[in-house]
Amino acid sequence: MAASMGLVRTIMRELGIFGNQPRIKKRTTTPAEDAAARPDLIGRDFTADAPGTRLVGDITYLRTGEEWLYLATVIDQFNRKVVGWSMADHMRAELVGDALEMAGTHGRIEPGAIFHSERGSVYTSAKYAAVAIEFGVRRSVGRTGSCHDNAVAESWFSMLKNEMYYRYSFATRRRARFAVMEYIEVFYNRRRLLSTLGCRTPAEVRATYVPQDATAA
């Protein structure tokens, strides 16, 4: 059935559906000199049998009236929950280190867990390595410029921007920080239904998890 653009816009407005204009992508990956030596321990297998064992993360940028706000995340592949995050006005190693530390201090990283990221210099820095060692994390990196090697992290950023960020203008970094925090902790982790989880929320999947040793007992 044919329909004019005006009719489509009217129906979308009545249903509360908004179109999003693609934004120019800002490069956030600066490969480290020794990045080629880092292994890819995930191999595009974005599944996990237990919480806190296979994690992914990345950095994105959000424009505000005070220039850029950078966001780093740590996502548990088991239930797609954002278990660690950090925001700052810079993209130094502390940004990703703080996100990983948040996940670790909340008991959401198992010893020997894999954390997979892109090959940016912040993810191969000595400061970041120290945090990874502290929590017994094995570092894994994808290929430079290949979004498919870190598809879960990339997809999550797209979800954040389409469902929240692109719909508002943020005059200050503080306002953007609050909105991102609310999206993660109030909406996404607790209420966002995900098709990859059988139309369940990250919180629901984690709450119903039973360790294998418990089922065998």
Image: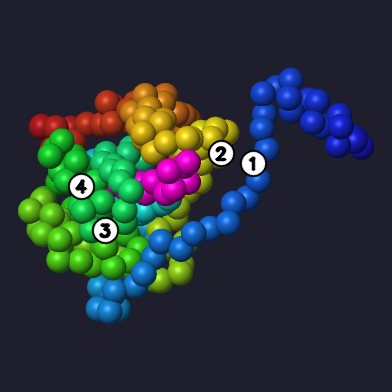
- Mark 2 or mark 4, earlier in chain: 4
- Mark 2 or mark 1, earlier in chain: 1
Question: Magenta includes 68?
Answer: yes
- Boundaries of the magenta span: 63-75
Q: Residues within 10 Å of mark 4 (few under 14, many from 20)?
A: some
Please state if 41 lies on the left or on the right of 46 as rendered: left
As displayed, is residue 122 above or below residue 185?
below
- Mark 4 or mark 1, earlier in chain: 1
Q: Which mark is residue 7?
A: none
Q: Which mark is residue 20?
A: 1
As displayed, is residue 148 above or below residue 104?
below
Task: Work out whether residue 147 or residue 163 is closer to the camera in this orientation and state it.
Answer: 163
Q: Secondary structure at mark 3?
A: loop
Q: Quadrant of the C terminus?
A: top left
Q: Which residue is mark 4?
A: 98
- The amino acid on which the numbered mark 2 sits, given as a three-letter code, is Tyr
Q: CA distance from mark 3 to mark 2?
A: 25 Å
Q: Which mark is residue 166?
A: 2
